[in-house]
Amino acid sequence: MRLIVGKDYSDMSRLAAGYVKKEILKKSNMVLGLATGSTPVGMYRELIDMNRKGGISFKDITTVNLDEYYPIESTNSQSYRYFMNDNLFDHIDIDKAKTHVLNGMAEDSEKECASYEDLISSLGGIDLQVLGIGRNGHIGFNEPGSQLYPYTHKTSLEESTINANSRFFSSLEEVPRHALTMGMKTILNARKIIVLASGKEKKDAVRRMLEEMIDTSCPATLLTLHNDVTVFATEDAVER
Ligand code: F6R
């Protein structure tokens, strides 16, 4: 696992965007796995800027997002589809038909998850997966527990995640209690992974991930099984 430390959030975002840019320049039709949450927003801004200035193009890129709340309408401003449109897709030259987010309103969630796995396989797998990390070490919506699902599945949100995400909703009650998420094997199958971590509240989770002891009570530790993971962190997320 490589660690790259930015002195602050904007520095970390710039470094991570630089990494993504290099990968896009190597393979203009790459399959890019994306994450939501506050952490990648700065990196998305940098990528939008690079796209505007002509440094990179997204026109041949296909994206697959990590997760989505369940149930939630894609038009709900808290849905991850809405988030992605608002923070990235609406501002770059991507073909929206090539952007994939799990359907938070699918009638049959199991079928939706199985089709998502099929979609990823039919695309030839994910070239680069972008991840954030939860304060409790969750990855996507793979929450700490004695067992972790390998593939895309429906899951219940941990109390701590509901509380952490309630800052985006008008009340705690409005936070959906379930989500659809790629599983740890779906994520580990990506050819390259980057993890973005910012702020001191991520320190414990980042430390456990970097210590490289595998423990399902901190799903991020499973990333040590992958041989091409780069962590972009702010100084306060790694200082001892
Ligand atoms: C987002 C996701 C989550 C976040 C994590 C960190 O698609 O799957 O695992 O990456 O909760 O969120 P922030 O960046 O808001 O601290």
Image (cartoon, rainbow, N blue to C red):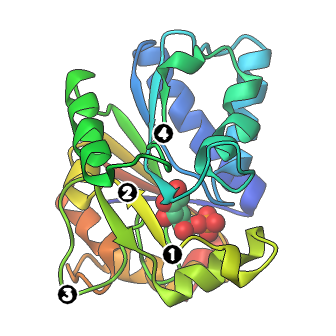
Query: Residue 72 at x, y = what percent?
Result: 58, 55
Q: Is residue 234 visible?
A: no
Query: Around disc 4, counting alpha carbons within 10 Å, would you say few (fewer than 14), some (14 to 19), or many (20 or more)?
Result: many
Under mark 2, the amino acid is: Thr
Q: Which element carries disc 1, helix, strand or loop? A: loop
Foreground label between 2 and 1: 1
Residue at the image position 26 percent from the left and 36 percent from the top: 115
Foreground label between 4 and 1: 1
Q: Earlier in the sequence, mark 4 or mark 3?
A: 4
Foreground label between 4 and 3: 4
Q: Earlier in the sequence, mark 4 or mark 1?
A: 4
Q: Which residue is disc 3 drawn over?
A: 146
Disc ID at residue 181: 2
Under mark 3, the amino acid is: Ser
Residue at the image position 18 percent from the left and 80 percent from the top: 147
Q: CA distance from mark 4 to mark 1?
A: 18 Å
Q: CA distance from mark 2 to mark 1?
A: 13 Å
Q: Nearer the viewer, residue 128 or 21?
A: 128
Disc ID at residue 101: 4
Foreground label between 2 and 3: 2
